[in-house]
Image (cartoon, grey):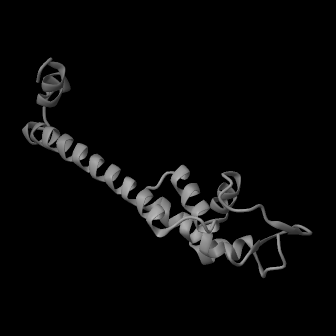
Amino acid sequence: MSALATIAVGALAQQAGVDVATIHSYERLGLIDKPRSAGRLRLYRTTDVARVTFIRRTQELGFSIEAIRELLGMTTKGRHTCGNVHDIAERHLLDIRRRLDDLTRLESMLAPLVAACPKAGSAAHCPIVNTLSHPGA
């Protein structure tokens, strides 16, 4: 690590909006550099706050660890453009839209079954079970 300003793991976690275990997880995944040790104190670079925040926010948006790693690599190597980042984000957006379509289809199939269930009586005679038990239903 260079002579950049440093920060303790607890402060890093608090400023980035994660817990300490998340910081350690990001380390194990190779998303952030291992900290420098000063005795028993683990010291991270203050610039890691933005990096950890970026990782947290991309995870909240559902990006895979591989995509996050790819995006992080693009920000540290000068040969990538905003268009490269756009392509990854667009690919992820298309995947989200596909999943939404699938969920909408599943919802339209399951909602009538749930609505038809009287919630009383034997599970063996439940309209949900009966419908799901018959081929072609």
Q: Is residue 53 left or right of residue 134?
A: right
Q: Quadrant of the N terminus?
A: bottom right
Q: Nearer the viewer, residue 70 or 103?
A: 70
Q: Is residue 83 left or right of residue 16?
A: left
Q: Residue at x 78, y 82 (%)?
A: 5
- Residue 65 in percent (x, y) is at 55, 52
Q: Quadrant of residue 73?
A: bottom right
Above or below: residue 68 compared with residue 120: below
Q: Quadrant of residue 75?
A: bottom right
Q: Is residue 29 left or right of residue 6?
A: left
Residue furthest out toward the bottom: 5
- Residue 135 in percent (x, y) is at 15, 17
- Residue 90 in percent (x, y) is at 37, 58
Q: Residue at x 88, y 67 (%)?
A: 40
Residue furthest out toward the front: 79
Q: Is residue 8 left or right of residue 59?
A: right
Residue furthest out toward the right: 39
Q: Residue at x 74, y 74 (%)?
A: 45
Q: Residue at x 39, y 54 (%)?
A: 92
Above or below: residue 45 compared with residue 131: below
Above or below: residue 105 compared with residue 8: above
Residue furthest out toward the top: 135
- Residue 35 in percent (x, y) is at 79, 65
Total numbered badges shown on the rendered structure: 0
Q: Quadrant of the C terminus?
A: top left
